[in-house]
C-alpha cells in the first residue's frame, strides 16, 4: 500500500467488500449455470429414455432412511422450545386456557418453515 492509501480510513475495507461482492456474484452465477445445465440434462435424458427411474427411487429411499431419524430428533427439541416459550407468554398475559391450542399452532407453524 502507498502512503496515501494508508492515510484514508476504510479504503482497504471498501476494496475487500468489493472483492467479496464480486466473488459472491461469480459463485451465484456459476450455481445458476449448474442448475440450468442439470435441469436440461434431466429433461434430455427423460425424453431420450436414458433416465433411470429405478436408481432415482433407490437414491430417494436411501436419503429418506438416512435423514429421517436425525430430522425427527432435531425437530422434537425445537417443538419443546416453542411450547415452553408460548406457555411462558400465555402465562404472562393470563391466557393459560389457550396455551394448548396456541402451542399446537406454534409447533405446526414452526414445522412448516422447514
Image (tube, rainbow, N blue to C red):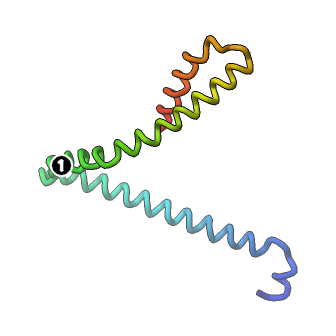
Could you say where residue 2 lies in the image, as x and y percent from the top left? Answer: 80, 88
The picture quadrant where one finds residue 32 is bottom left
Return the residue at label 1: 46
Q: Identify whether 60 is placed above or below 80.
A: below
Q: Residue at x 51, y 38 (%)?
A: 77
Residue 96 or residue 5, whichever sits in front: 96
Q: State how many labels appear.
A: 1
Q: With 81 as the anchor, is 28 left or right in this view?
A: left
How many neighbours does mark 1 have within 10 angstroms: few (below 14), some (14-19), or many (20 or more)? Answer: few
In the image, farthest residue toward the bottom: 2
Q: With 45 as the anchor, is 86 left or right in this view?
A: right
- Which image quarter is the N terminus in? bottom right
Q: Residue at x 74, y 69 (%)?
A: 14
Could you say where residue 69 lies in the image, as x and y percent from the top left? Answer: 36, 43
Could you say where residue 95 lies in the image, as x and y percent from the top left? Answer: 68, 14
Could you say where residue 30 lies in the image, as x and y percent from the top left? Answer: 44, 63
Amino acid at each position: 500500500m502507498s502512503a496515501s492509501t494508508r492515510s484514508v480510513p476504510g479504503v482497504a475495507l471498501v476494496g475487500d467488500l468489493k472483492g467479496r461482492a464480486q466473488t459472491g456474484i461469480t459463485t451465484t452465477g456459476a450455481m445458476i449455470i449448474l442448475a440450468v445445465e442439470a435441469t436440461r440434462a434431466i429433461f434430455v435424458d427423460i425424453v431420450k429414455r436414458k433416465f433411470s427411474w429405478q436408481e432415482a427411487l433407490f437414491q430417494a429411499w436411501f436419503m429418506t432412511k438416512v435423514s429421517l431419524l436425525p430430522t425427527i430428533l432435531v425437530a422434537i427439541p425445537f417443538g419443546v422450545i416453542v411450547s415452553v416459550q408460548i406457555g411462558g407468554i400465555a402465562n404472562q398475559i393470563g391466557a393459560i386456557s389457550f396455551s394448548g391450542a396456541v402451542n399446537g399452532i406454534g409447533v405446526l407453524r414452526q414445522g412448516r418453515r422447514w
